Amino acid sequence: MCGSIRFVTAEGTTERVLRLLAMLQRRPSWTATELAAELGVTERSVRRDVQRLRALGYPVHATAGVGGGYQLGAGTRLPPLLFDDDEAIATAVSLRLASRGTVAGAGEAALQALTKLDQVMPPRLRAEIRAVHDATDTLIGPGIEIGADLLVTLARACRDAVRVRFRYPSRRGPDGDTERTVEPVRMVTTGRRWYLMAWDVDRADWRTFRLDRMQDVTAGTWRFRPRAHPDPVEYVQRSVTEAPYRHTARVRLRAPAETVRRLVPAAVGRVDDEAAGEAGEQWCLLTVGGDELDWIALHIARMGFDADILDPPELRDTAARLARRLAAMVDDG
């Protein structure tokens, strides 16, 4: 399967056929009358142009009768694609980002696709894309690569509502590996890791699974009836910021929630809005997990906001002890 990118540069019949293709890509369905009016030709010319597109490999479907018309469908191979300037720029920028991504094999494929696109792109667009690239950087560090076949398997299972079986390692070590049967709902990525939110059939509860830890993944044919579920993004965020750690801290901060969210990545902590306090003061609630209370206290202190520790109570003692140590370091006496 292969495809290519074409830009509208021809004239006459070829230009009209490409305009027809762009229209079919833009909207799900058109009547022959509508196409003829937009192109300024007769309906007979439209039918001929549709035949030209089919000869080039585009699966243009036609339906007769009232409400019928022309529709661009999926074919057995990928035909040439037609992008306008904005779409070409967006595609090229996305391919550059994908070349640094966490999907195994996608980086090389993205670079190959970008090379093909750059080869046929007009110089004016190439210059704009390079300007965007040169002016952009990312703070996202290297993530854990996930096989593209695993992503496709899980995506199809979510779409088709079929159960998935896999082995999942226990925190106790290899001897604690368990067989899981789940009803998948959604995949969520934090930028560094991928997670699956699913209903664990044997445990009769919602669970979050790291894709890089899932082994021998198999999608079955057993279709399940989708059940009401929590918001996948919120559920995964809560799971990865609280469940894996020994301690979960809840702290009120005197700062707008949006300000704190810029300092605390979603994979590290959850920030919830709170009603404004006296004199219109803005507060928010930070929930963050950690294995060491010292680390949590330092993380909160370095943000520089007034804080009110709600729980655990031991965090107050830890913060007081750290404060005494820091004060002793600068005590001239």
Image: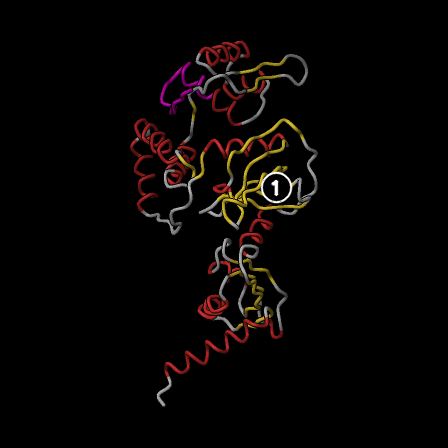
Extent of the magenta region: 1-19
Q: Residues within 10 Å of mark 1 (few under 14, many from 20)?
A: many
What residue did someone put label 1 on?
198
Give the SS element for disc 1.
strand
Residue shown at the point (40%, 83%) measured from the top left: 328
Q: Quadrant of the N terminus?
A: top left
Q: Position of residue 316 (x, y in %)?
A: 55, 74
Closest to the observer, 266 or 168:
168
Q: Position of residue 68 (x, y in %)?
A: 64, 16
Q: Position of residue 292 (x, y in %)?
A: 49, 65
Q: Does residue 188 appear in the picture of this structure?
A: no
Q: Position of residue 166 (x, y in %)?
A: 56, 36
Q: Magenta segment: does it hold 234?
A: no
Q: From what the image shows, is residue 76 above or below residue 236?
A: above
In the rendered image, the residue lying farthest to the bottom is 333
Residue shown at the point (31%, 30%) measured from the top left: 115
